[in-house]
Amino acid sequence: MTAIDLSSALSTLRASAPLVHNITNFVAMNTTANALLAVGASPAMVHAIEEVADFAPLANALVVNIGTLSPEWVEAMVRAAEAANAAGVPWILDPVAVGATPLRRDAGRRLMALKPTVVRGNASEVIALAGEVSAGKGVDSTAASDAALDAAAALARDSGAIVAVTGKIDYVTDGDRTVAIDNGDAMLTRVTATGCAVTALIGAYLGAGFSPLDAAVAGLATMGVAGEIAAAGSNGPGSFQVALFDALAALDDATLAARAHVS
Amino acid sequence: MTAIDLSSALSTLRASAPLVHNITNFVAMNTTANALLAVGASPAMVHAIEEVADFAPLANALVVNIGTLSPEWVEAMVRAAEAANAAGVPWILDPVAVGATPLRRDAGRRLMALKPTVVRGNASEVIALAGEVSAGKGVDSTAASDAALDAAAALARDSGAIVAVTGKIDYVTDGDRTVAIDNGDAMLTRVTATGCAVTALIGAYLGAGFSPLDAAVAGLATMGVAGEIAAAGSNGPGSFQVALFDALAALDDATLAARAHVS
Amino acid sequence: MTAIDLSSALSTLRASAPLVHNITNFVAMNTTANALLAVGASPAMVHAIEEVADFAPLANALVVNIGTLSPEWVEAMVRAAEAANAAGVPWILDPVAVGATPLRRDAGRRLMALKPTVVRGNASEVIALAGEVSAGKGVDSTAASDAALDAAAALARDSGAIVAVTGKIDYVTDGDRTVAIDNGDAMLTRVTATGCAVTALIGAYLGAGFSPLDAAVAGLATMGVAGEIAAAGSNGPGSFQVALFDALAALDDATLAARAHVS
């Protein structure tokens, strides 16, 4: 797998201005909407079971994030994913804290069965989700980072999704080959909802017509490079978050391509 | 219609410190509360059907925003509007994306039947809402901006509400006469929930005793002038949002009156 | 009661990195999560009745805030508090606007019956809550600030909770002795959810193993000193909020101990 060409990713995204339908958590809604606006996408937050199936086909991509969950929202997520699938709308799953409770494990299993286009989680989420999907196949016997990569590859093979594991280095895999993105800054972990926001950025690239693997790499690189730029101009998590939105909006193709470390 | 006198609008609002009851969407709640605090109003977010009728009469104004909707919230909005009407509390409707789904169209129709004091939406929302209220009367045959003005006037005449249509230029109409407010900055469209926040500012002016038309003009001018000041001192949508709250809090009568373009 | 020793409070908190389970209001969720991250705690927002009892025992502390209430959330709060009690997890109640409606008064009464470790409210909330808990005992006949202190002491004695009353000067009482914390800045009242955030900071100190009284004093002092630092470097409520997160993250033991006015 050659490195992804990012030289026109952002301008393509902005020219497309995709409508991104989000069913996301209460903590991340505002941050996610502003991150999507900053890169030129059009965010919509629509969660009621009575309207998600009407709305998902109108969107260019769907983002499903289980951060603040309730059974009613799980039903709406399922219905939205089904409607997206029926309409050919790509969708991405963010399995926040999927291993923490039975409600989350069950939601993760049901949503994976609907075959998301992309899954984006941290190491423990991807390991937990892989365990739900391929119970008994064993993803638990190696070192932490290896375990996450093994789990991601198994999850991708079992589900057909592109799987992105974020951490100090981000990885994207189709189950066969793996791309590493070595960007970002530790400050991204000091502000809430940046993980949710990068999931939405991948959704925006999906909505702009990128392939699932290219969308995942482009979304992670965009947030990573913007995070580096923001960290250089901030004094703590408050000013970092402000600078992050400014950096996302100011980022251009040349800067993204020059600074992205994709291999 | 002469231009509205804004020379003491903000100081009157701040002296009144109105309690504004908001039933608004999850994306906008924090931004709305901070915008209201910045201009000297007192925000309360209360949405449960079990308490909205107890709370609405305690407030000086009610703001109803259908951004992140569910059937339960629609019932609470209806009950709150009925309680506000019974208590003589003015209220404003923000019909977010009202045309997008049946759930929203139905909510728009039911809320309009309760006769909001003011309606504030963008062009497509006002056109969609006017179509729901006066189906068949035809608001669809002219150019986009004319269509919005025609729809706003028809909606105002049919409902008795003052209708505000926001865009590059904002318009306020009672169905007969129209006031234009030519303030603001494109950055206001790059940050989520600024439209919801300006609806709440109009609610604050209503709660301070301004006439519906004066409240709409004053609210739009306040946000527009603050947006211009904020844009001049920011580097992107992140710093713009920060500067917007600072500008709303620092704005004074003389600056508002001098910079507002109302005709 | 001697003054609390704050000389290692923050470093102890950061070394502990407590997991804080929040059931809080929609306005405050993002602000609360970022305040907790800024001081080195790990926030989780989990509210569904189907999972709160699974999650609360995993956490080091539970924060219950009734800001945006519904009956379903009250049931989840009750279940979470019961699970926290059963697991020996300390918890703090923030009785937002508890006196405003029957739904809130009932929620306040039910939650107090579950014996929170700490209660944090403003004067009118503490007075209202004390009235619910000890109806007829009379907390209404003296001047406002005295009434709040009397109510706080009565509430502490009746419930066994440590009670914190915030205002220009903050007070913490066990019903017998009272500690005053004279820090903070008026700007803290111009940004929404700072009260909710300080409740969560007290929760973080509880989760790090501080005694209830020490946790309350340390949390209030941490927010108060950070607020003073932030106010000195900001131009209004927008930049103040940004500076507040920066100040919380940058605050160290020596600065906190030197600037805290605890007596």
Image: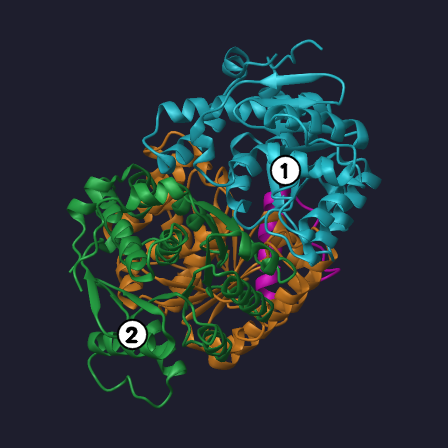
Chain colours: A orange, B green, C cyan
Q: Is residue B254 visible?
A: yes
Mark on residue C125?
Answer: 1
Verify whether residue A142 appears in magenta. Answer: yes
Q: Which residues are magenta?
A: A134-157
Q: Is residue C96 above or below residue A63?
A: above
Q: Hey, which quadrant is residue A98 in on the image?
A: bottom right
Residue with the most extreme front position:
C141
Q: Quadrant of the C terminus of chain B?
A: bottom left
Mark 2 = which residue?
Answer: B152
Q: Quadrant of the N terminus of chain B?
A: bottom left
Mark on residue C5?
Answer: none
* Residue A71 picture location, percent across and down: 68, 64
* Residue C224 picture location, percent across and down: 51, 24
Q: Is residue A161 visible?
A: no
Q: Could you tell me which residue is drawn at 38 percent across and 87 percent down? A: B135
Q: Hey, which quadrant is residue C19 in on the image?
A: top right
Residue with the most extreme right position:
C86
